[in-house]
Amino acid sequence: MHNPDRPVEVEVVERVEETPTIYTVHLRFTDPEVAAAYRSLPGQYNMLYLFGVGEVPISIVSDPDHEGPVEHTIRSVGRVTRGMESLKVGDRMGLRGPYGRGWPLQEAEGQDVVIVTGGLGCAPVVSMIRYVLRRRERFGRLVILQGVKHTDDLIWRRQYERWQELPDTQVLLAADVGGPNWPYSVGKVTVLFNQAGIDPDRSIVMLCGPEVMMKASIDRLLALHVPPESMWLSIERNMQCGIGHCGHCQVGPYFVCQDGPVFHYPQLRPWLGVTGF
Amino acid sequence: MDPSALFLPRQSVDSLFEAIRNRGFSKLLGPVAADGAIVYREIASAADLPTGLRDRQAPGTYRLEVQNDGVRTFSWANGPQALKPLTFAPRETLWRCERDASGELRFRDVAREHEPTAVFGVRACDLAALQIHERHFLKAPYSDPHYAARRSSLFLVAVHCSHPADTCFCASTGDGPRAESGYDLAMSELDDGFVIDAGTDRGRAVLATLGLAPASSAQQEKADREIEAAGRAQRRSLPSQNLKSALYGRLEDPHWDQVGRRCLSCGNCTAVCPTCFCHAEQDEPALTGETTEHLRQWDSCFTAVHSYMGHFLVREETRLRYRQWLTHKLASWHEQYGRSGCVGCGRCIAWCPVGIDITAEVSALLESGDAQS
């Protein structure tokens, strides 16, 4: 019987230092057959493995049709991600996946795609943004609303500036604390909603970030008459197996690792913001 | 009356063991009295069974008592172990990784061969729990090969319960005291032997080699009466309806604080629970740095790190951990597995060091005000 817990080997072919604690690795499957069979969807994640240390779930940044290496942006927060910090080009690690349910691609077709992210939680939506940009004709407007605490927390600033130049694309940024080099808004991400000109009847909203931020954003969107059925969100939990067995990520009737990490808002509504779930 | 039921005289139990061994199940586990409790260990013959012993269970209490002149070997309800450690091992290596001098990694499966093992004296509650675990671990598309290999190595001999403990409530969850399915052989103990019946072809094949006489209707009736009495004797119960909306509607009930103050968050309940399946994964590298084993180990939602997320804990307080355990077991479980996650074995009551009683906590919650929707 196939062992679904066992990773395959990947090689680090590029490493980008995004900030002192955030880095991006580009991973190549060393087995060409595995590489040929590998397919992921925006919003899914892989379990990445560091030899002798352990595994950690990390969302996939690269586009599903991108044939090159798989890209992961990692923030050093725990034992495994801090260990992965020292990986260099040529180093080997383990990967299994992709796992979980990604963003609603079919539901998004023909709609304005509104992306709301906060803090450093933007990695899971980057693949979705890239997906829309590569298939621009299938979608309406692309609206990206990003909030950060401090102005230095904004990684990929140049990427945001590049996206801003694209037709039918609106990028709005807000920082809790502004500064001399911050030409954008000051405040929580919710201050951006009025500027965004969201059409509640033809928008699909995808949220990712701290749950308090997502909850505040959803409340604001509901006030703007965006129907609950048009909202989707990606959440994070302790995930150790990725295949619905280990039990850590259970929230109400769901195992986030398999039933999520992307959920339709009406599914998650009873649990969002309830302490302890 | 079941026409296929046979009678196994007490002095022939060893010939049953022999027949099971001849069927290829070289290892035989059965209940023995050890360390002050009924536990499943390797047994050589019927002489190893706990003759004349009773268990006394109450919240926070488990004691074995000798019954004078007792001839029976199953005058007890259960011990701390279920079948769980045999199918879902407390520690299991999932795979091994080797790193060569150039840093290349090789991921390898570990052998998943287990000695064919017969378990004698399985309880109805534990068979019900086994079926729940099969739903959890063997569900497509990620059927667990480690669980499957252990499960398929077992031959199960159930013994219907005739002596429930004070902590038992399987009659209310519908999981006992009679073993209904999932066994190869099922037995009822009488003073002079066992009424025995098969549940599988291989069970029938074992019985066919023994040349047993059919059980008389008097023997079968006595066995049935004892099982029925065992159900009626249970004083604890859980409500038979799905508690999902009742519990989901009481997530902010003050009773969670009350039970949270008593709970030590020790995890004993989840260790003895036959349906709890949480496990943590970790690496155990060899000192040479060349190989590492990736293994899983039982975990508990009562530990702090169970809800660890790199920057915070989802459930810092004990009341939230108790609520997580109870609402998962009795509410979300219905949505995930089509039934409650409690089989009424009562182990979490007896083995809780402070005697927290799941049935009493549920009653207290249901009595305290109306559910909020």
Image: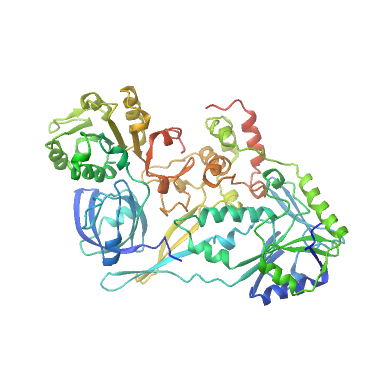
**In the visual, does B185 lie left or right of B254?**
right
- Residue A135 appears in the picture as rendered: yes
Kindly identify the residue that appears in the image at 39 percent across and 44 percent down: A260
Q: Quadrant of residue A197?
A: top left
Q: Position of residue A186 (x, y in %)?
A: 21, 27
- Residue A238 appears in the picture as rendered: no
Near-viewer residue (A88 or B372): B372
Q: Point out the residue furthest to the bottom here.
A: B22
**In the visual, does B155 lie left or right of A119?**
right
Name the image colouring. Answer: rainbow
Q: Quadrant of residue A36?
A: bottom left
**In the visual, does B293 lie left or right of B265?**
left
Q: Position of residue B269 (x, y in %)?
A: 60, 49
Counting the numbered discs, the total is: 0
Q: Position of residue B14 (x, y in %)?
A: 76, 73
Q: Quadrant of residue B331?
A: top right
**In the visual, does B188 lie left or right of B296?**
right
Kindly identify the residue that appears in the image at 75 percent across and 54 percent down: B161
